[in-house]
Image (cartoon, rainbow, N blue to C red):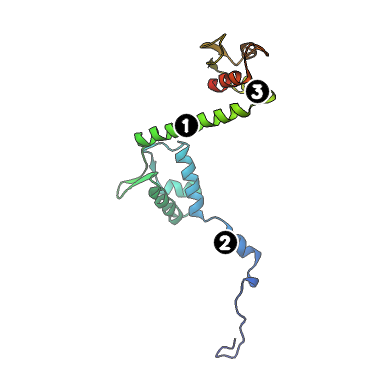
Amino acid sequence: MNSPTGITRKKRSLQGVTVLSHQRAAAPRAATLVYNALLDDIVSLRRKPMELLNEKELEAQFGVSRTPIREAIIRLADDGLVDVFPQSGTFVSRIPRRALYEAMLVRKALEDTTVSIAVEKMTPAGLRALERNLLISMPVTVKVMSQPSISSTMISTSSSALSPAFPASGQSSSRSRFTAIVTAC
């Protein structure tokens, strides 16, 4: 292309874009990083409901300017996770009781369905692996529900007490053994 000065310019195309430009374009923005970090803190309750979100503290924590902090707060407010009160501050939103009840209901339904599907597909080897994992990872007292011989008996999984509670073949099917283990969780 000729310009009035007589200099010929090339047309811009994607071929001239460097790898660095693509990396910069693909990298998340500071506001997105702050949003994701705050979202994680709020959802995991590291930031409690009604806790003040101080912009200056957030700037220091994340090492960014006010603009990315404000953009992240606006997104969190749009999601209903923070409440912005002009001239007062920004606070983590309270968890509405109805939303909590609905979340618990959905979680219970999902867990019930997951356990039902897992029980149907459980193999004896998988059951043994589950029993070993429970012995290792659950040093708490559990209530075994579906064992006819020890129904509603309290047993401790921190010792080897779980193995006798689930006798070998003949006395209990894999399905009821698995149900007892999962119910204990």
Question: For the point 43% across and 38% down, which residue is it?
Answer: 47
Residue in front for this viewpoint, 134 or 10: 134
Mark sitting on residue 25: 2
Which amino acid is tagged 1?
A: Ala
124 shown above or below 52: above
Residue 10 point in image, percent of width and height? 62, 81
Q: Residue furthest right?
A: 125
Q: Residue furthest top?
A: 149
Image marks 1 and 2: residues in contact by CB distance under 8 Å: no
What is the quadrant of the C terminus in the image? top right
Give SS at disc 1: helix
Q: Nearer the viewer, mark 1 or mark 2?
A: 1
Distance in Å between CA atoms under marks 3 and 1: 23 Å
**Is residue 63 visible from the viewing direction of this image?**
no
**Is residue 131 visible from the viewing direction of this image?**
yes
Which residue does the numbered mark 3 point to in the structure image?
Answer: 127
Distance in Å between CA atoms under marks 2 and 3: 48 Å
Which residue does the numbered mark 1 point to in the structure image?
Answer: 109
Residue 32 point in image, percent of width and height? 50, 52
Residue in front for this viewpoint, 38 or 174: 174
Residue 95 point in image, percent of width and height? 37, 37
Which amino acid is tagged 3?
A: Leu
Give SS at disc 2: helix
Image marks 2 and 3: residues in contact by CB distance under 8 Å: no
